[in-house]
Image (tube, rainbow, N blue to C red):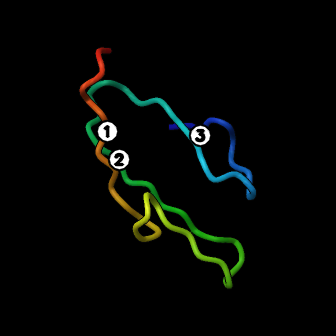
Amino acid sequence: MELDPVFAGDRTGYSGRVRSVVSDLTVSATPTNVASGVSVNGGGSSETVSLNRDRPP
């Protein structure tokens, strides 16, 4: 999956597209500065995200 827009250190939100058969994916983030922290959807630095399958294809 490609991020949209491409990764930038000052950006906090991204989107991407996956095939309709994908029901969840794991998002992992690693800060480049050891004094920084990251979270995925308010959780840890690596979280499984369930995708919204209620939308029509």
The reply to whether discs 3 and 1 touch (Cβ–Cβ < 8 Å) is no
In percent of the image, x 64 and y 71: which residue is there?
31
Residue located beneath label 1 in the image: 51
Instruction: Tell me the element at label 2.
Output: strand
- Please determine whether, in this image, residue 8 is positioned above or below residue 37: above
Q: State the image quarter where residue 55 is shown.
A: top left
Residue located beneath label 2 in the image: 25
Whichever of callouts 1 and 2 sits on the residue coming sooner in the sequence is 2
x, y percent for residue 9: 74, 58
Q: Residues within 10 Å of mark 2 (few under 14, many from 20)?
A: few
Whichever of callouts 3 and 2 sits on the residue coming sooner in the sequence is 3
Instruction: Tell me the element at label 3.
Output: loop
In percent of the image, x 31 and y 24: which residue is there?
20
Residue located beneath label 3 in the image: 3
Residue sitting at the far top? 57
Lateral position of residue 47 relative to residue 6, left or right: left
Lateral position of residue 7 relative to residue 43, left or right: right
Nearer to the camera, 44 or 18: 44
